[in-house]
Image (spheres, rainbow, N blue to C red):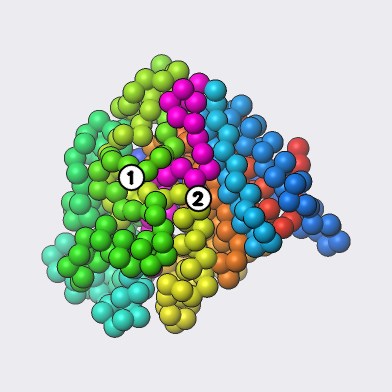
Amino acid sequence: MAASSLLAAAGLVVALGPPGQAATHPAGTPVGSVAAPADAAGSGTKSPSHAQQRAQLEHLARKLVAAGAPGVIVRVDDGRGKPVEIAEQAPWARRDHRLRADDEFRMGSNTKTMMATLVLQLVGEGKLALTDPVRKWLPVQVPNGDAITLRMLLNHTSGLYDYTEDPAMVPSILGKDRTRWTPERLLAVGVRHDPKFPPGTKWAYSNTNYAAIGAVLETVTGKSLAELVRDRIARPLDLKHTYYATDSAWRGPHARGYEPDAAHMPPGVPAEFKDYAGTPRHGHVDVSRNNPSWGGPAGAMVSTAHDWGRFYTALMSGKLLPAAQLAQMRTAVPTLPDQPKGPGYGLGIATAPTPCGTVWTHDGGIPGYLSVNFTDSTGGRTATVLVSTEAFAEFPEAFPEIDNATKELQTATMCTMFGKPAPTD
């Protein structure tokens, strides 16, 4: 689930989503906007000090909590010294858990960047090719399988229907159905619907693409996605709190995720998405123990802000991929047809020009957790913002205060990463 704030403004919706909502918007259909840091990057503007940056981010994080967010984590490493780490929390949520900047959380669609990295590692080893048709690896499962290539799955140009649009997924999204989903089962949900367009003719975000990618990875390697993430990424980089979740269990201290309970869900939220399973807490439900396996290869990763920063640094600096494969990852297709030099989506990662600098980024949402991660082209600068609730990003018009405060914090965090002044009130 979830709509990106920064990326939605660029026509990108890079997250899991319920039927008819965030993940279904085609390229060129923005579902929100990021606060534009006008004048923030103007020539001659003095770079703010670390103390000034931290104070601004703390102010905006507290503002977001005051707007209704149960908790917020911010981490920024601008390459100039000790990273800024902030954790703010609503007083009522502290009774469950004291939020820390290094807590684990569910990464949602940020998972796609890691899945794409695994594919490109295998491409570099000659075990896969981006031009491989899907039918080569999944002979009977995908319509247009002869015409859809692995590249099209990775950059969302396949035309496959998004499985999260299927009403049958709603109980799992809400945490009421504890089915343990596999990539193959998620793929089956998506491909029982007609494709939306011929392969390679358009860009449209679809989680089914990554269900297929997960199935290919397991078929080619004979290993589970959890093993592949562990052996090829987490252990080599010493990411102690990064893992692919197949059930609701956590491995370390973790942020609690919440959604409003049915009685406190705003009127603008459709009836079918008002009642999440979870433990009642102060007008909310704690959804932390709900099974995330329905996210699968499209959204089931768990990590921390620190670990994901290390991952981005290793990825962009070439530690995880050969130069040729990193270049392939960063070859982006435009997501706005009338802006060929505007925002784009590469292989599991997005890019967008902003007033503070060009970012490489992905976001992710799954009930209880909305996060966005940024890096520059070298991996020398990284940043993360987590909000420990997510329905607001699916239905921003129903949660205008949280939505606006989130966009403001995300923009300030991204500008801070580049050492640029953040916009002020």
Q: Amino acid at mark 2?
A: Ala
The correct choice, above or below, for 52 with respect to 156 in the image is above
Q: Quadrant of residue 44?
A: bottom right
Residue at image location 60% in from the left, 42% down from the top:
86
Return the residue nearer the eye: 257 or 299.
257
| Left or right: residue 62 compared with residue 278 | right
**Between 230 and 284, which is closer to the camera in this rendering?**
230
Of mark 1 and mark 2, the one earlier in the sequence is 1
Between residues 41 and 50, which one lies in front from this camera angle?
A: 50
Residue that badge 2 annotates:
305
Can you say whether 2 is above or below 160 in the image?
Answer: above
Q: Mark 1, residues whose alpha carbon is within 10 Å: few (<14), some, or many (≥20)?
A: few
The residue range painted magenta reads 92-117
Q: Secondary structure at mark 1?
A: loop
Q: Where is residue 373? Give x, y as percent.
A: 52, 54
Q: Position of residue 323 (x, y in %)?
A: 47, 81
State how far apart marks 1 and 2 are (Cα): 15 Å
